Image (cartoon, grey):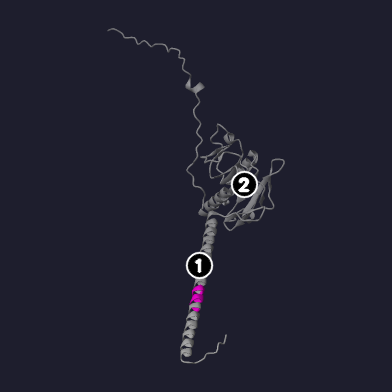
Protein backbone atom coordinates (compact mmCIF):
# COMPACT_ATOMS: atom_id res chain seq x y z
CA UNK A 1 0.00 0.00 0.00
CA UNK A 2 1.30 3.32 -0.92
CA UNK A 3 0.79 6.02 1.69
CA UNK A 4 -0.50 9.35 0.39
CA UNK A 5 0.79 12.41 2.20
CA UNK A 6 -1.22 15.64 1.95
CA UNK A 7 0.96 18.62 1.35
CA UNK A 8 -0.39 21.95 2.57
CA UNK A 9 1.01 25.04 0.94
CA UNK A 10 2.01 27.91 3.23
CA UNK A 11 -0.13 31.04 2.96
CA UNK A 12 1.45 33.65 0.80
CA UNK A 13 1.65 37.27 1.92
CA UNK A 14 -0.97 39.51 0.40
CA UNK A 15 -0.94 43.22 -0.30
CA UNK A 16 -4.72 43.49 0.29
CA UNK A 17 -5.73 45.38 3.46
CA UNK A 18 -7.11 43.48 6.39
CA UNK A 19 -10.89 43.98 6.60
CA UNK A 20 -10.81 44.27 10.38
CA UNK A 21 -7.86 46.62 10.58
CA UNK A 22 -8.40 49.10 7.79
CA UNK A 23 -12.02 48.79 6.64
CA UNK A 24 -14.39 49.72 9.45
CA UNK A 25 -17.93 48.39 9.40
CA UNK A 26 -20.53 51.05 8.55
CA UNK A 27 -22.35 52.34 11.61
CA UNK A 28 -26.10 52.35 11.16
CA UNK A 29 -28.19 55.06 12.82
CA UNK A 30 -31.81 53.82 12.55
CA UNK A 31 -34.67 56.26 12.07
CA UNK A 32 -37.31 54.06 13.68
CA UNK A 33 -37.63 51.57 16.48
CA UNK A 34 -41.14 50.40 15.63
CA UNK A 35 -42.61 51.95 18.76
CA UNK A 36 -45.89 53.95 18.58
CA UNK A 37 -45.79 57.75 18.49
CA UNK A 38 -47.49 58.15 21.87
CA UNK A 39 -49.57 56.19 24.34
CA UNK A 40 -52.97 57.87 23.74
CA UNK A 41 -54.67 59.70 20.89
CA UNK A 42 -54.69 62.88 22.97
CA UNK A 43 -50.91 62.68 23.43
CA UNK A 44 -50.54 62.15 19.67
CA UNK A 45 -52.79 65.14 18.97
CA UNK A 46 -50.81 67.36 21.37
CA UNK A 47 -47.56 66.38 19.64
CA UNK A 48 -48.89 66.87 16.11
CA UNK A 49 -50.56 70.20 16.92
CA UNK A 50 -47.36 71.51 18.51
CA UNK A 51 -45.40 70.35 15.45
CA UNK A 52 -47.77 72.03 12.98
CA UNK A 53 -48.12 75.30 14.90
CA UNK A 54 -44.35 75.72 15.31
CA UNK A 55 -43.66 74.79 11.68
CA UNK A 56 -46.03 77.51 10.52
CA UNK A 57 -44.61 80.01 13.01
CA UNK A 58 -40.97 79.31 12.09
CA UNK A 59 -41.41 78.86 8.35
CA UNK A 60 -39.57 82.11 7.55
CA UNK A 61 -36.71 81.37 9.98
CA UNK A 62 -33.69 79.13 9.59
CA UNK A 63 -35.15 76.45 11.81
CA UNK A 64 -36.30 72.84 11.55
CA UNK A 65 -39.01 71.32 13.76
CA UNK A 66 -38.75 67.59 14.51
CA UNK A 67 -41.37 65.32 16.06
CA UNK A 68 -40.73 61.86 17.51
CA UNK A 69 -37.48 61.48 15.57
CA UNK A 70 -34.23 60.11 16.93
CA UNK A 71 -31.73 62.59 18.29
CA UNK A 72 -28.25 61.03 18.22
CA UNK A 73 -25.83 62.76 20.55
CA UNK A 74 -22.61 60.65 20.50
CA UNK A 75 -20.92 59.92 17.20
CA UNK A 76 -20.15 56.25 16.68
CA UNK A 77 -22.67 55.12 19.32
CA UNK A 78 -26.06 54.55 17.69
CA UNK A 79 -27.54 53.44 21.00
CA UNK A 80 -26.88 56.90 22.42
CA UNK A 81 -30.14 58.29 21.21
CA UNK A 82 -33.44 59.71 22.41
CA UNK A 83 -36.66 60.61 20.60
CA UNK A 84 -38.02 63.96 21.84
CA UNK A 85 -41.71 64.47 21.17
CA UNK A 86 -41.01 67.86 19.56
CA UNK A 87 -37.72 69.73 19.19
CA UNK A 88 -36.53 72.80 17.29
CA UNK A 89 -33.04 73.14 15.86
CA UNK A 90 -31.97 76.54 14.57
CA UNK A 91 -29.35 77.43 11.96
CA UNK A 92 -29.37 74.16 10.05
CA UNK A 93 -30.42 73.44 6.47
CA UNK A 94 -34.20 73.44 5.99
CA UNK A 95 -34.99 70.01 4.57
CA UNK A 96 -36.54 66.70 5.58
CA UNK A 97 -34.43 64.70 8.03
CA UNK A 98 -34.84 60.98 8.82
CA UNK A 99 -33.19 61.69 12.19
CA UNK A 100 -30.85 64.31 13.65
CA UNK A 101 -27.20 63.83 14.58
CA UNK A 102 -25.77 66.67 16.63
CA UNK A 103 -22.24 66.25 15.23
CA UNK A 104 -23.52 66.59 11.67
CA UNK A 105 -25.76 69.58 12.17
CA UNK A 106 -23.28 71.22 14.56
CA UNK A 107 -26.25 72.63 16.45
CA UNK A 108 -27.88 71.43 19.65
CA UNK A 109 -31.69 71.62 19.79
CA UNK A 110 -32.66 74.98 21.29
CA UNK A 111 -35.95 73.81 22.75
CA UNK A 112 -37.55 70.42 23.42
CA UNK A 113 -41.12 69.49 24.35
CA UNK A 114 -42.10 66.23 25.98
CA UNK A 115 -45.80 65.34 26.15
CA UNK A 116 -45.65 63.40 29.38
CA UNK A 117 -47.83 61.12 31.50
CA UNK A 118 -47.63 59.18 34.73
CA UNK A 119 -46.19 56.27 32.77
CA UNK A 120 -43.28 58.29 31.35
CA UNK A 121 -42.69 60.54 34.37
CA UNK A 122 -39.46 58.90 35.52
CA UNK A 123 -37.88 59.01 32.05
CA UNK A 124 -39.06 62.56 31.27
CA UNK A 125 -38.21 64.01 34.68
CA UNK A 126 -34.96 62.20 35.43
CA UNK A 127 -33.17 60.78 32.39
CA UNK A 128 -34.31 63.21 29.70
CA UNK A 129 -34.18 66.32 31.86
CA UNK A 130 -30.63 65.48 32.93
CA UNK A 131 -29.58 64.56 29.37
CA UNK A 132 -30.99 67.74 27.80
CA UNK A 133 -29.37 69.78 30.53
CA UNK A 134 -25.97 68.19 29.82
CA UNK A 135 -26.40 68.61 26.06
CA UNK A 136 -27.10 72.31 26.54
CA UNK A 137 -30.71 72.41 25.32
CA UNK A 138 -31.71 75.96 26.27
CA UNK A 139 -35.34 75.22 27.17
CA UNK A 140 -37.13 72.03 28.18
CA UNK A 141 -40.94 71.95 28.43
CA UNK A 142 -43.11 69.27 29.98
CA UNK A 143 -46.78 69.13 28.97
CA UNK A 144 -49.11 66.77 30.81
CA UNK A 145 -52.46 66.73 28.91
CA UNK A 146 -54.33 64.90 31.66
CA UNK A 147 -52.63 66.73 34.54
CA UNK A 148 -51.41 63.46 36.04
CA UNK A 149 -48.28 64.85 37.66
CA UNK A 150 -47.25 68.24 36.20
CA UNK A 151 -48.85 71.15 38.13
CA UNK A 152 -51.28 73.07 35.89
CA UNK A 153 -50.34 70.62 33.08
CA UNK A 154 -47.43 72.72 31.78
CA UNK A 155 -43.97 73.54 33.11
CA UNK A 156 -40.92 74.93 31.34
CA UNK A 157 -37.26 74.99 32.35
CA UNK A 158 -34.44 77.21 31.10
CA UNK A 159 -30.69 76.86 31.52
CA UNK A 160 -29.21 79.41 33.89
CA UNK A 161 -25.68 80.81 33.78
CA UNK A 162 -24.39 77.66 35.47
CA UNK A 163 -25.98 75.40 32.89
CA UNK A 164 -28.66 74.18 35.31
CA UNK A 165 -32.37 74.03 34.51
CA UNK A 166 -34.50 76.47 36.48
CA UNK A 167 -38.32 76.66 36.30
CA UNK A 168 -39.81 79.29 33.99
CA UNK A 169 -42.29 81.17 36.17
CA UNK A 170 -44.13 83.20 33.52
CA UNK A 171 -44.47 80.43 30.90
CA UNK A 172 -42.72 82.65 28.34
CA UNK A 173 -40.26 81.03 25.96
CA UNK A 174 -37.26 83.26 25.22
CA UNK A 175 -36.20 80.86 22.48
CA UNK A 176 -39.47 81.15 20.58
CA UNK A 177 -40.62 84.57 21.80
CA UNK A 178 -43.94 83.00 22.67
CA UNK A 179 -46.09 82.66 25.77
CA UNK A 180 -47.34 79.14 26.38
CA UNK A 181 -50.41 78.00 28.26
CA UNK A 182 -52.32 74.77 28.69
CA UNK A 183 -55.68 74.86 26.91
CA UNK A 184 -57.57 71.69 27.78
CA UNK A 185 -55.49 68.94 26.15
CA UNK A 186 -53.31 71.14 23.93
CA UNK A 187 -50.67 73.84 24.26
CA UNK A 188 -51.72 77.35 23.25
CA UNK A 189 -49.00 79.59 21.81
CA UNK A 190 -49.22 83.42 21.92
CA UNK A 191 -46.82 85.96 20.41
CA UNK A 192 -45.03 88.13 22.96
CA UNK A 193 -45.01 91.19 20.67
CA UNK A 194 -48.74 91.49 20.04
CA UNK A 195 -50.48 88.77 22.06
CA UNK A 196 -51.80 87.12 18.91
CA UNK A 197 -52.51 83.42 19.21
CA UNK A 198 -50.80 81.05 16.79
CA UNK A 199 -53.50 79.09 15.05
CA UNK A 200 -53.54 75.40 14.32
CA UNK A 201 -54.27 74.18 10.79
CA UNK A 202 -57.87 73.49 11.82
CA UNK A 203 -58.23 77.00 13.23
CA UNK A 204 -56.61 78.52 10.15
CA UNK A 205 -58.97 76.56 7.93
CA UNK A 206 -61.93 77.73 10.03
CA UNK A 207 -60.69 81.33 9.79
CA UNK A 208 -60.34 81.04 6.02
CA UNK A 209 -63.81 79.53 5.69
CA UNK A 210 -65.31 82.27 7.85
CA UNK A 211 -63.53 84.93 5.77
CA UNK A 212 -64.87 83.34 2.60
CA UNK A 213 -68.39 83.32 4.05
CA UNK A 214 -68.09 87.00 5.02
CA UNK A 215 -66.84 87.82 1.51
CA UNK A 216 -69.71 85.89 -0.06
CA UNK A 217 -72.20 87.66 2.21
CA UNK A 218 -70.69 91.03 1.29
CA UNK A 219 -70.96 90.12 -2.41
CA UNK A 220 -74.58 89.12 -1.90
CA UNK A 221 -75.35 92.42 -0.13
CA UNK A 222 -73.64 94.38 -2.89
CA UNK A 223 -75.56 92.44 -5.53
CA UNK A 224 -78.82 93.05 -3.68
CA UNK A 225 -77.97 96.76 -3.43
CA UNK A 226 -77.27 96.82 -7.16
CA UNK A 227 -80.56 95.09 -7.80
CA UNK A 228 -82.40 97.57 -5.59
CA UNK A 229 -80.64 100.48 -7.33
CA UNK A 230 -81.59 99.03 -10.71
CA UNK A 231 -85.17 98.53 -9.58
CA UNK A 232 -85.30 102.12 -8.29
CA UNK A 233 -83.86 103.35 -11.58
CA UNK A 234 -86.45 101.34 -13.49
CA UNK A 235 -89.18 102.68 -11.24
CA UNK A 236 -87.95 106.25 -11.75
CA UNK A 237 -87.90 105.69 -15.51
CA UNK A 238 -91.41 104.29 -15.41
CA UNK A 239 -92.60 107.33 -13.42
CA UNK A 240 -90.91 109.64 -15.95
CA UNK A 241 -92.60 107.84 -18.83
CA UNK A 242 -95.93 107.94 -17.02
CA UNK A 243 -95.57 111.67 -16.38
CA UNK A 244 -94.67 112.25 -20.02
CA UNK A 245 -97.72 110.27 -21.12
CA UNK A 246 -99.95 112.31 -18.79
CA UNK A 247 -98.51 115.52 -20.18
CA UNK A 248 -99.15 114.42 -23.77
CA UNK A 249 -102.70 113.35 -22.88
CA UNK A 250 -103.32 116.74 -21.29
CA UNK A 251 -101.93 118.52 -24.33
CA UNK A 252 -104.20 116.52 -26.67
CA UNK A 253 -107.23 117.25 -24.50
CA UNK A 254 -106.43 120.95 -24.40
CA UNK A 255 -106.08 120.98 -28.20
CA UNK A 256 -109.49 119.36 -28.66
CA UNK A 257 -111.08 121.85 -26.31
CA UNK A 258 -109.55 124.76 -28.21
CA UNK A 259 -110.88 123.28 -31.43
CA UNK A 260 -114.33 123.34 -29.80
CA UNK A 261 -113.88 127.00 -28.92
CA UNK A 262 -113.19 126.42 -25.24
CA UNK A 263 -110.43 128.56 -23.93
CA UNK A 264 -108.15 126.87 -21.40
CA UNK A 265 -106.33 129.06 -18.94
CA UNK A 266 -102.64 128.24 -18.62
CA UNK A 267 -102.05 127.54 -14.91
CA UNK A 268 -98.32 127.49 -15.36
Query: For this rendering, which residue is in front, 169 or 214?
Result: 214
- Expressed as whole percent of the image width and height from the top left, the position of residue 133 reads 65, 41
Mark seen at residue 223: 1
Residue name at image x 52 percent, y 71 percent: 229
Whether the magenta-drawn stretch holds residue 117 is answered as: no
Q: Residue 266 falls in which quadrant of the image?
A: bottom right
Q: What segment carries the magenta color?
A: 232-239
Q: Which residue is situated farthest in the top direction here? A: 2
Q: Residues within 10 Å of mark 2 (few under 14, many from 20)?
A: few
Dot 2 lies on which element? helix
Please give left or right for residue 194 compared with residue 4 in the image: right
Label count reads 2
Please give left or right for residue 89 compared with residue 259 in the image: right
Q: Quadrant of the N terminus?
A: top left
* Residue, disc 2: 125
Query: For this rendering, which residue is in front, 50 or 208?
Result: 208
- Expressed as whole percent of the image width and height from the top left, the position of residue 77 reads 55, 33
Q: Residues within 10 Å of mark 1 (few under 14, many from 20)?
A: few
User: Looking at the image, is mark 1 or mark 2 earlier in the sequence?
Assistant: 2
- Expressed as whole percent of the image width and height from the top left, the position of residue 117 reads 57, 51
Residue 235: tell me if it is visible. Answer: yes
- Against 168, residue 13 (above or below) is above
Q: Please tell me whether mark 1 or mark 2 is closer to you in this view.
A: 1
Q: Quadrant of the C terminus?
A: bottom right
Whether the magenta-drawn stretch holds residue 235 is answered as: yes
Amino acid sequence: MVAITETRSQPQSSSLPSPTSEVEAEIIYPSSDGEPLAETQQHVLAILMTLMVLRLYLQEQQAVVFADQFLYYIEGKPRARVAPDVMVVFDIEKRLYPNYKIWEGQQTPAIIFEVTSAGTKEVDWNFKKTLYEQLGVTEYWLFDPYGEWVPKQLQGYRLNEDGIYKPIADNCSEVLQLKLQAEEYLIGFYRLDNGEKLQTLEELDKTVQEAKQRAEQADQRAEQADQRAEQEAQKAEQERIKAEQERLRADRLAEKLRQLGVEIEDES
